[in-house]
Structure formats: C-alpha cells, structure tokens
Image (cartoon, helix red, strand yellow):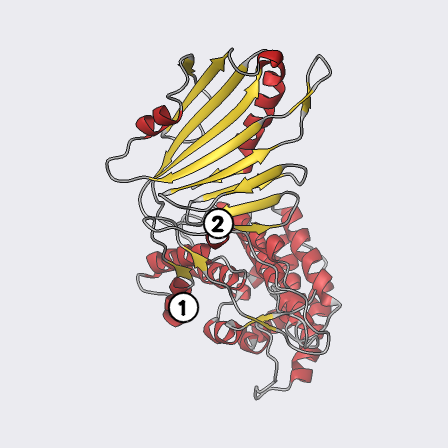
Amino acid sequence: MRKAIFLLIGMLIAVNAFSNVNYIEISKISNEDRLVNAFNYIKDNQQYFAYWTNEWKYDKSQKELIKNLRESYEMFSSVATKNEELFILLGDIAHYLYNLNESDYYLLGDIAHYLYNLNESDYYQLAVNNYNSAIAINPDDYRTYWFLGFHYVLSNAPTLGIDNFLKAQQLLPAKQPADFWEEYAWATAVTNMPSHCIYAMDKARSILGTPGRFESQLGLEMHKRIVDVDKNISYKKEDIWSSSEGEKMAFTSRPLGIKVLVDSTWKLSIYDYKNSQSAFILIPPAIKSKKGKDINYTIAIIMKAANLTDQLDDYINTLTSNYSNKSKITFSDKYEKMVAYEIKDKEIYKDMGGGRTYMIGIERNSPMYPGLLLENPATIPDGNNNKISYYRATYSKNRFEGRIFYAIMLDCCEDINEQSLAVFKTLFDNQIIIE
C-alpha cells in the first residue's frame, strides 16, 4: 500500500500518542517471563514506531527496533495456543515493522501496525491477516475492527479503514474508551471527513470531561474546514454540488443536505440554487411497455430552504395544485415528517394509458452534525515512488440553516406504471440520502 501525506499529517502525528497495544492483555496470551518482557518492550517503546516519520531523529536505533520487533513477532508466533488476544498482538507488531522501511508509503495499525512503522513491507498483509484471524475467533470484539481500521487508514485504504471504525463503533462497550474516539478523529481528519471528526472530538470530550489531545491541538483547524453558507443568496450548481465515482456516481450537496446515487446509464440535469430552491432531474433508461413501445419517464427532486412560516403541506400543495385527481397515500416511513400523493391524469399521455404521478414531500431540520450522513472517506492519490507526496485537505460547505423541504416526484404513464414505480422506490429507499 502506498503512503501519501496530508499537509496536516506532520501536526497529526505529533498530536497522537494513542496505542492499541495498551488494550491488549498479555495474561490472556502467556505468563511466561520472556513473552511478558517482550510485550512490555513493545509497550515501553511504542512511541518510536507507532507513527511513520520521514527522518529518524529518535535516540534509539531504528535497526535495533526492527531486530527486536522481528524477534518478538517470531516469539509470539511460536505460542502454541492461538487465541484472539495473540492474533491482535501479532497484527500490531506486523503493522509497526511495515512502517520503518517504506519511506514513500503511508502509515498503518499495532504489532503488525508497529512493524509497519519500522519499514518491513512484507508485514502489511500479515497485519491484515492476523487481525482477520482475531475477528474470526471473536467477531464481536470492537478492538480488532478498531485496530484494523486504523491500519487501513494509515495505509491509504480509507474506505476499508472507515468501514472497520464504524463496525467497531457499533460494538463499543458501555464504558467507551476515549482513545477510540481520539483515533477515530485522527482517521476521519486524514480521510477528509470533517463532520465525523468533529463528532469524534465531541465524543472524546464527553468521556474525558475536557477536550482530548486531538481537539486541543487541531480542533479549531477541523472546525475551519467546514465553511458556512447563506440560504438567502444564490449559488452556482458547481459551488454547492460535488460528484464522486464508485459503483454508482454519487452527487452530493452538503448545503442542501442530500446525496443521490445515480447509475451511469441515467441522464441528469442539476440546476443552480436561487430563490431558495434547486432541482435535480433524472431520466432513467426507457422502459418497454407491454405493447412493445419504449417509454421514457422522469424523476425530479426539488429542494427548498424553508422560512420560519413555511409549511410542508402548503409547499407540496403548491407543486400539485394543477392536479384535481390526487389522493394521499402511504409510501414509506423512512422519514418522520413526510407526505405522499398519487396523481392520475387521463388528459395527458393518452396514447400510453394516461398520466400517473407520485409526489413525495419531506421536511428535515438541520442535524446536530451536518454532513455526517453524506461524507465518504477520500483516498489520497498515489505519489511519486521515490518521494514523500503531500496533499492539502479540502474545505467542505456547511448545510443551510433551518429546515429544508424535499419534493421527490415520479412522472410516468399508466403503461409503465408498475415498472417505473419499482425503480422510483429503489431510488428512494437505497439511492437518496437526506440528512
């Protein structure tokens, strides 16, 4: 895996002094003196290999650390009883060995994590394998997902890293460790997820009763990475929308609090934000009717930043005022404040059975952590093989304050009603994320 360093990384490394190895119980592995001594050596020297550094300026020999970590790995590998605790420790050691030799690579997670930091490139996958062996023994232990997630993030595999942090979060004990949230803040900072980072800083502070190490050093910087916007002025679409490629194209507007996942075969149009509104129009591929005719249909999402006196029902009624034959329906319980209508109009699309429209109205207030549902981890591009590459974290726009109305409409005809409605429901349930 290739290392690539954010401009902030130097500060981040200085801030962090967390250590996964502190959460490992050597008594669950062995009480043999030589193994206990080896474990204590790793704990006592973790500051030298917990994080990758471009220039070795420590008072201890890098070669000696590598030698001792290699010996520790071999020693613990020879333990006859292979349990979860042992595999976690082996994963940590391999992580550190990997990091001490690959100067143009990034950082990783504990003994495998530690060995990674000492530059032994063969140990990257060994760390992953050991962590996964621990998970196979006990899939409900938050520690392994935490350590593996940190390992992945520091080796520029952000999606795998954040996925494992999220798994760990779901398994945290009632008494949550502040160190988890400190490392989660670190991981989401370097993967350009500022809302998650702020959330993690707040969680650490709530546990500690005071700002954590990360927040004390970089909290202000992380808050600055989210830029306020004003719902009462106009914005070009490119100023409030962004896109990213994946299995589906993801179009995200943090100011409007929405993400839409779109298949590459769909056509779309995005409109500027003005008069407190914007629109996102989708045209999926045509559907063949029972008569053999290819028929197109349209899905529209209209977003309006509401004023204090605006009401969702009034807004949706305004959009559907030209339709006489409309009835309220139960469409979904995905959102708390939501209305839905089915509209029939035999005067349009007469050669296709008449018109059929579905209008969904949703009201959402600004959440405590805007962007939390919309952020995805950013991968740092591969750099030059022979040099350290530095990358500057980007800034994110905040959500418009207050309530936002979302009107989501399917415009189709009777001849393809069933098929187009199925596509619409799949989009609504799985491909539209609204905060």
Q: Quadrant of residue 125?
A: bottom right
Task: Please indicate, yes or no, whether residue 194 appears anywhere in the rendered image.
Answer: yes
Question: What is the CA distance from the residue labelled 1 to the residue labelled 2?
Answer: 27 Å
Residue that numbered label 1 is attached to: 221
Q: In x, y percent, where is residue 270?
A: 52, 43
| Residue 32 seen in render | no
The disc labelled 2 sits on which kind of residue?
Answer: Lys
Question: Residue at horizontal 31%, vertical 44%?
Answer: 402
Q: Are marks 1 and 2 in contact (CB under 8 Å)?
A: no
Looking at the image, residue 24 sits to the left or right of residue 204; the answer is right
Asked if residue 250 is positioned above or below residue 320 in the image, the reply reads below
Instruction: Give the labeled residue for mark 2.
Output: 237
Q: Nearer the viewer, residue 257 or 270?
A: 270
Asked if 82 appears above or below 293 in the picture, the reply is: below
Q: Quadrant of the N terminus?
A: bottom right
Q: Quadrant of residue 146?
A: bottom right
Above or below, 55 relative to 157: below
Q: Could you tell me residue 73's position as x and y percent? A: 70, 68
Report whether 292 appears left or right of 303. Answer: right
- Label 2: few (<14), some or many (≥20) within 10 Å? some
Q: Amino acid at mark 1?
A: Glu
> Is the residue marked by circle 1 packed among few (<14), some (14-19), or many (20+) residues within 10 Å?
few
Q: Is residue 92 left or right of residue 310?
A: right
Give coordinates of residue 42: x percent, y percent: 59, 73
> Could you tell me which secondary element the residue under label 1 belongs to?
helix
Give 84 or 344, whichever is nearer the viewer: 344
Residue for point 65% across, 83% down? 62
